[in-house]
Each structure stands twice: as structure tokens, then as C-alpha cells.
Amino acid sequence: MLHYESFTKQVCQDHQNVCGDHIVSFNHKDSYYFAIFDGVGSGIHANLSAIASASRWKKMIREGISISGACERIAADMNRARSQKSTFAAFIAVRVTNHGSALIYTFESPRPILSRKGVTRILKPRHIATGLEEIGEIKFDLEEGDMLFIFSDGVSQSGMGRGCALGWGEEGVTAFIRRHFAFMEPFELLDALVEHCNKISGNQYEDDTSVIMVQVSEARYLSLFSGPPRWRHNDKAYADAFCKAEGTKVICGSMTSDVLARELGTKVKLVSKGDGLHSPPIYAMEGADFVTEGAIALNQAANLLYAKPDEVTGNSAPEQLARLFFNSDVIHIYEGLALNEAHEMLRFKQLGIRVRHEALRAIMNRLEDLGKMIHYHPF
């Protein structure tokens, strides 16, 4: 299975307070989506055009419409907008699956660039008629180590009228990436690329300039079990799921570990008593990589996910748990839905400790914001 990490860089057109390009990145089911919507014009008008089109496209994807169907509908909207002189946005949209299948659709936008094993090239679309408009479609398979670049025309048209009638073009961008990508980290490469756009445009940004780089790697898995099943007759199925779970196996909750240990015929051992609420106990159980308390550890881990990964260096249970999240790409959450009366204690409310269910929701939402793929399994 593959994972896709995105790196972005965006700069407004000079003398504008808002960007007319809008970047989209999210996960849905077993696919990752990336897009740039480029509102025509500049400033607030272009910004609103891009955001409106991007929001509608994302909504359609989440409602189950295919990426091709969503892109065709947006292109049809743009045809009406063109004739009615309404808000208009060009776009390039990408969907990639965890098996590597990639689909890219372009509408009045530059073609994407792929770097693979030292070879950097432009991906050429086939053109599809959709009503009175035409969109480009590219189908291919991604591999571990690939880097995919998509960008707005503020990148490809840089240098326009300064030695290049239409700017340095996709070919110029490709040549720049080819020269530099092997020697730079992703953020450094994007910074250098956008800086070069400024340089060849007379040290100014003549258009909104946006670029996304998608880096392909082998996915790292984590499976988290928290809470006993709602019904005791599901305990065996819960334990079976634990045995079959992928990657690093984490248990959060003393009752959870007791249920799993009983079903698996093993024992839970205390490793560290902890040091108060900020450092709950750590346990050990055969088959598990990390075992700690439930709501208390989950609440603190949820908060730590808003820190920078290199700031989370301690050995407390919440810090270890947060590091495990940071270092995973695909995360399976197995939540037992049995109620825990202890979570309703006044002391928990006084300290602002969310119940397990709410803490897990906060963690899942934050992990999705960080680009992680989340799979939820209730018991």
C-alpha cells in the first residue's frame, strides 16, 4: 500500500491581499485528493471564484460522485460562467488510490509533471469533450519514490514577455525540477521554484503562484484499540480484529486491555506507574506494541497533535502515543462502544477531560488534517 504526502507553496500576486488560487487536499475512503483551483482575474474576485468552485467539487466527491463526474460538472459550470460573465476558475484535480492508481483532470491549467527514478517529464492528457467544454484526462500508476507536481499558470507563465513570449512554460518548470530535485528537500525545492518564478518575472509576482508536490512512499500502519465492545458477545470478534490488525498495535484503556488479554489468554503487566494525570501508567501485553490508559492519554495525545513533531520528545504515555500517530500514515481506529461510568465523574468534567468517544473524534479529525488516512471500526 502507498501513502501520499503533499507539500505546498503559494504566493499572492503583487499588490494583492488575497490569493486567487485555492489549494485543496483531503482523503476520502481509500483515495487521496489534491487540486488547485485558479480563479480568473486577481484579488478578492478571483479568490471567491476559486473557493466556490473548489468547495462544490469537494462536496461532490464526498457525496460519492466520481472525480470525472465532479470535474465534468465544474467544467460545465465554467461554460455557463463564461457566457454569463460570472465567476470562473480553471483547475487541475488529482485522485490517487492506496494501490497507486492515479487520475488527473485538467481544465485550462498547466499539465502535471512526474519525477521517477531520475527522469522528470510532462504528463500529456487526452482530451475529452464535456458539453461545450473540453477537459484533459491522464490515467497512470504511481510507484514508491515518485514525485508528482501540479501548479497554476502563475508558475508556467512566469517570465512572460521577458525573453519568452508565453513564459518559461511547462518545459522550463520541468527542466528546473530535473536540475534540482535530487539535491533539495521538498520544501526547499518548492521555495526555490517559486523564487525562480519571481526572478524571471523581473523580481515580481505577476500572477498568483501555487504549486503542490505529492511524494509517494510505502504506507506505515497503526491500529488503535480503545474501549470494550458494547456487547460482551462481540469480545471474541474484537480480539480477532486485534490479531489481524495491521502495523503497530496500540491499546488505550485498562478495560480494553483486560478484555483483549482475557480473550487472547495472556496477561497485562505494569511497566510504569506514571506520574499523575499528565503521565498515566504504561503497560505491556503480548501482541501489543504500546498499552496505556484510555480517556486521559487520548485527550492529551489529541492536544499534542497540534504541536510540531520535533517538539514531542518526552517519554510520557501521551507523548509516546502522539509520536506513534505522527510516524504513521494509515491509521485504523477500533472503538469499543461500551459506556464507562468513570468518564461521567465530576472530576473528569472539572478537568475538561473529554469522554473516550469525543477524544477519539478529536484525534481522527486532527490526523485527517495532517494528511493521514483514517479507517474507523466500531464494536
Image (spheres, rainbow, N blue to C red):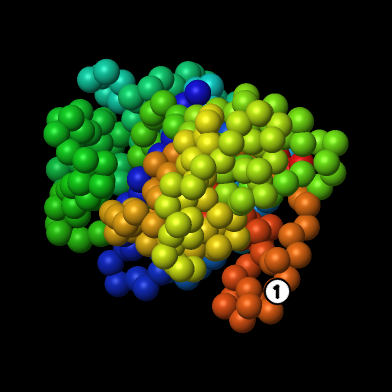
* Quarter of the view holding residue 41: bottom left
Q: Residues within 10 Å of mark 1 (few under 14, many from 20)?
A: few
Instruction: Give the residue pinned by disc 1.
Output: 345
User: Does 86 sit left or right of 286 as displayed?
Assistant: right
Measuring from the top left, give residue 307's x and y in whole percent.
37, 62
User: Does 226 sit left or right of 93 as displayed?
Assistant: right
Q: Count the marks: how many?
A: 1
User: In the image, is residue 118 above or below residue 63?
Assistant: above
Taking the spot 30% from the left edge, 34% from the top edge, the residue there is 170
Tell me the quadrant of the picture where the C terminus can be found.
top right
Q: Out of 165 and 69, give the one closest to the viewer.
A: 69
Measuring from the top left, give residue 279's x and y in whole percent.
43, 62
User: Does 170 sit left or right of 370 as displayed?
Assistant: left
* Quarter of the view holding residue 186: top left
Can residue 76 be seen here? The reply is no
User: Does 210 sit left or right of 96 as displayed?
Assistant: left
Can residue 351 be seen here? The reply is yes
Q: Callout 1: helix, strand or loop?
A: loop
Measuring from the top left, give residue 118's x and y in whole percent.
23, 20
